Amino acid sequence: MEPKNKSVALEPTADLLSEVMDGERRFAFASGDCLEVLRQMPDESMDCAITSPPYWKMREYEVLEKHNHTLIGDEDDPKDYVKNLVAIFNEVRRVLKSDGSLWLNIGDKFQNKNLMGMPWRVALAMQDEGWVLRSDIIWDQMKGTQSAKDRMRDVYEHIFHFVKTRKYYFDAASIKIKPSKNALVTDTKTISATGVSGVKYREYILSSDCLNEEEKKNASKALDDVLAMVRSGELVDFRMTIRGQQRTYHSESTKISGRAKELADKGYFFIMMKAEGFLPSDIWRIVPEDKWRKDSHCAVFPEELLFTPIKSTSRPDGIVLDPFSGTGSTVAAALKLGRKGIGIDLSENYIAISESRIKSSFNGSGGLFF
């Protein structure tokens, strides 16, 4: 059966989800209170969740009057805001697979000139509920305006990566950044991508007063092995730290630093960059998306922000959930990467915009998904 080419507002959610899981539907949007919708979903049915809930006391959203009492972000007390979000994310944890991930983007708020620290209030409360926090991504938006004259401009937000357990699905290979330069290898010399040849390291080893003869021999052999890996193409770059020559990274304590212990035990250690690439850092420089800001929704995810979480923490053809889906960015990005998508939003207007977005993005481009 061909996947259906449009989503629908909330049918019985179990039936709707079943259609997505069975492949009859590539995506679906459910209109309603996300806590109530999540409670209708089966346990461990989603690969990952990516979302950005309404920020506390930051924006007004257009919803039916019957939903006014369920509006997240409208609470008078910030403690109630945290409590309500934690209750929702506990339901998200239930519907995530045991090796699933939650990516949470959340902004901060000044009240009476006092920065409230809302992202970390929520993150710490979620850790208290049993979530494991793996990363705090800084989303540098690279632009911004500000009316205040007595503090710095706001240009970043947090994206927290939470998991249910210490062992979780993570496809590192799918997001590795390929080195921009290769090593230089000739008949007479081997030079890494940043110009490291090993000559200085060899001098440090041979002239060291901090290494005994056996350690010098082992360090020289290890350097030869690393240079051979550069020549073979397995590595593009490396750094060597030798006892007494360079400082240990992070800490000199062998109790808390594996590098310090390695330096104490062997007299050296290596930092190596493999040719297969390296993982992104925890600072993402991505300009906010403007295309879908034509409506009343003024907090739109840029799809570029979603590609790394989706590729790394959802399996091909897996299901990506957004319990605050807004104008459908998460679902659209999931479809582009060959996943399925489920979006939930309180606003029927946003659901309609999301459906229109999916149609215009995919139906008009050669029927990529439908």
Image: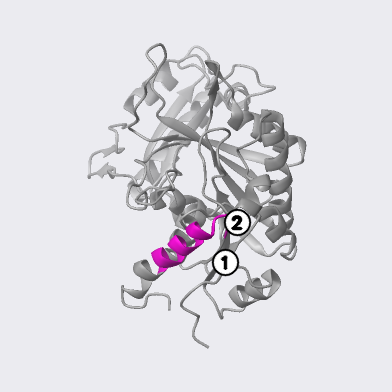
Give left or right: position of 7 versus 141.
right
The amino acid type, in three-letter code, at marker 1 is Gly
Q: As drawn, is 202 to the left or to the right of 28? A: left
Question: What colouring does the structure picture have?
Answer: one colour
Report if residue 349 lies within the magenta region: yes
Q: Can residue 83 be found in the magenta stretch?
A: no
Pick out the residue farthest to the bottom: 1
Which element is circle 1 on?
A: loop
Name the dominant secondary structure of the magenta segment: helix
Residue 81, horizontal then vertical, whole percent = 67, 35
Label 2 crowding class (10 Å Cα cut-off): few <14, some 14-19, many 20+? many
Q: Which residues are magenta?
A: 344-358
Label 2 residue SS: strand
| Label 1 sits on residue | 318
Residue occupied by mark 2:
48
Relative to residue 261, is residue 106 depicted above or below?
below
